[in-house]
Image: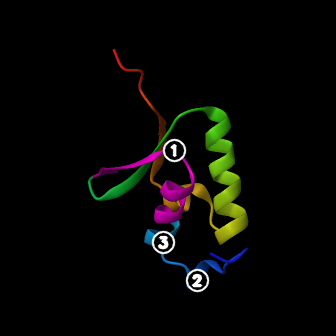
Amino acid sequence: MSLSASRKNVPQDVVIEQVTKNFVCRTLWSEGRPCLEYTSEEQLREIETYVRTQFDWDLYDVFFTAVPTLDDE
């Protein structure tokens, strides 16, 4: 994906695909809306920066919400 791709030219699905390809995270679906599952606050900030710089999207325009990964118990 080229740097600073114009938002109007990049579908939401492509942004989601690139985020999950480039980061250890998952997309969960709630009532048909994508939710980002991330592993740490640092990773969330990295993903936010990536989405903003690569696609000119706000993270919450791509994902309905973001939730931390739950510990296995």
User: Which element carries disc 2, helix, strand or loop?
Assistant: helix
Among numbered discs 3 and 1, the one appearing first in the sequence: 3
Specify whether 36 is left or right of 33: right
Residue 63, numbered circle: none
Q: Residue at x 46, y 64 (%)?
A: 17
Label 2 vs label 1, nearer the camera: 1
Q: How far apart in space, not on screen, are marks 3 and 2 (Cα)? A: 12 Å
The amino acid type of the residue labelled 2 equals: Lys
Q: Residue at x 63, y 50 (%)?
A: 47
Name the residue carrying label 1: 24
Counting other residues with Cα less than 10 Å from the Cα at mark 1, is it few (<14), some (14-19), or many (20 or more)?
A: few
Q: How far apart in space, not on screen, are marks 2 and 1 (Cα)? A: 26 Å
Q: Position of residue 46 (x, y in %)?
A: 68, 47
For the C terminus, the image quarter is top left
Q: How is the image coloured?
A: rainbow
Among numbered discs 2 and 1, the one appearing first in the sequence: 2
User: Which element carries disc 1, helix, strand or loop?
Assistant: loop
- In magenta, the rendered stretch is 16-30
For the image, the number of numbered tags is: 3
Q: Position of residue 56 (x, y in %)?
A: 68, 70
Name the residue carrying label 3: 14
Residue 27 painted magenta = yes
User: Which element carries disc 3, helix, strand or loop?
Assistant: helix
Name the residue carrying label 2: 8
Q: Position of residue 50 (x, y in %)?
A: 67, 58
